[in-house]
Amino acid sequence: CMDENACNYNADAEVDDGSCYYAEENYDCEGNSIEPSVDYLSQIQPIFDNNCGNCHLGNSSAGLNLSDYNNLMSGGNSGDVVLPYNSAESILIQKLGPNPPSGGSQMPRNSNPLDDDVIALIALWIDQGALSTPPTCEDYLACNYQAQAECIYAEENFDCDGNCLFEVDCAGICSGES
């Protein structure tokens, strides 16, 4: 494969044999998510501040206070409303959708529903672990050291740009034994 953007790029290839394959959107070649981390304070809390204030910021309707991260994660009268890594089962996402559980009302009540992309952002935040702050890669050996994301590492025998670090054998395998 001669395409530098392909997962199986071979710098020594002289003929494009049509064997190139590529990572799926928002994933690297190893299947790791590369979706940017959602930041609770700058992206999620403003949604609550702008859309849920009449009932869930100072008033804590149904015992749910959305004024800050700790209150949100404490849940409401029905228990936890956010299940980290599981937006589909999180009551918060269910209540924002068109068919809320237990015959309840879609939130925000007496207002227009949130746009699908806003709900998708909240769901992504939950699926990323519902963290108060995005993770930061602290491992200096990682390809994305100090990035606001989970650490991503190079494939064995390759650098972070996909270049082979060792000799390529006669079969075209980086550090192979043929």
Image (spheres, grey):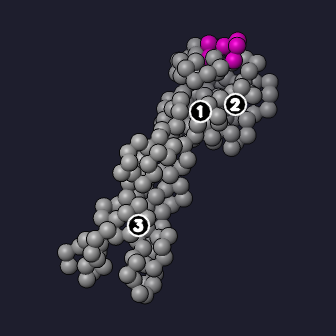
Residue 146: x percent and y percent? 47, 45
Relative to 9, is 87 on the left or the right? right
Q: Is residue 61 magenta?
A: yes
Residue 131: x percent and y percent? 51, 32
Relative to 39, is 15 on the left or the right? left
Residue 53: x percent and y percent? 74, 21
In terms of image quadrants, where is residue 13?
bottom left
Which is the main secondary structure of the residues drawn in magenta? loop
Relative to 10, is 26 on the left or the right? right
Q: Is residue 83 magenta?
A: no
Q: Nearer the viewer, residue 22 or 62?
A: 22
Helix, strand or loop status at disc 2: helix
Q: Nearer the viewer, residue 9 or 99?
A: 9
Q: Hey, what amino acid is under mark 2?
A: Pro
Quadrant, the C terminus: bottom left
Label annotation for residue 173: none
Helix, strand or loop status at disc 3: loop
Residue, disc 1: 40
Q: Crowdedness of circle 3 by 10 Å Cα count: few (<14), some, many (20+)? A: some
Residue, disc 2: 46
